[in-house]
Amino acid sequence: MAEYLIYFNQQWVGDHTEEWFRGRGPLAAAVVDEIKAAGAYVFAGGLEEDGPVSSADATSGTLRFTDGPYVETKEWLGGLTVVDVADEETARMWAGKLAEACGWPQEVRRFGHLPQPADE
């Protein structure tokens, strides 16, 4: 099994009416319920569009926290789902279901393996 990140940038959502968004919420929730029922659910959630953002940067050798995103960007993460599935094909299937339910594109990326600590 491998964990995959399925996510979208807020800019991919597009402009829609409040009624349109209310109609999509239950569809997306149903897909998340389906992922849970399949035993593939790890996490899912949307980010607050206007919520506080802060960054941590230690590249100068001193840890600094700042308000706002690390770099100026025209795109930012809107929401994500993490699934634990047997293969990329299954991850893509869930991404497709989420794309259809939400009405905007989803991107799929496999999580890399963390290095294992050496035995002492």
Image: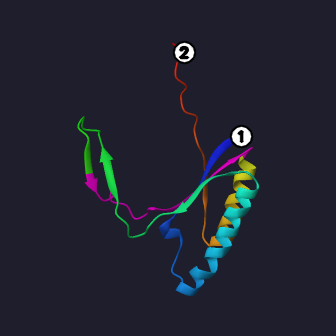
The Cα–Cα distance between marks 2 and 1, rounded to whole angstroms, is: 24 Å
Give above or below for 103 relative to 85.
below
Q: Is residue 64 shown in magenta?
A: no
- Location of residue 66 in the rendering, given as x and y in whole percent from the top left corner: 26, 53
- Location of residue 106 in the rendering, given as x and y in whole percent from the top left corner: 61, 62
Q: Residues within 10 Å of mark 2 (few under 14, many from 20)?
A: few
What residue is shown with label 1?
A: 1
Q: Which residues are magenta?
A: 66-87
Residue type pointed to by label 1: Met
What residue is shown with label 2?
A: 119
Give above or below for 36 relative to 51.
above
Q: Is residue 67 shown in magenta?
A: yes
* Residue 93 placement: quadrant: bottom right
In primary-sequence order, the first of circles 2 and 1 is 1
Q: Residues within 10 Å of mark 1 (few under 14, many from 20)?
A: few
At x 57%, y 87%, the residue is 19
Image quadrant for the N terminus?
A: top right
Q: Say what secondary structure mark 1 lies in.
A: loop
Q: Say what secondary structure mark 2 lies in.
A: loop
- Location of residue 109 in the rendering, given as x and y in whole percent from the top left corner: 60, 49
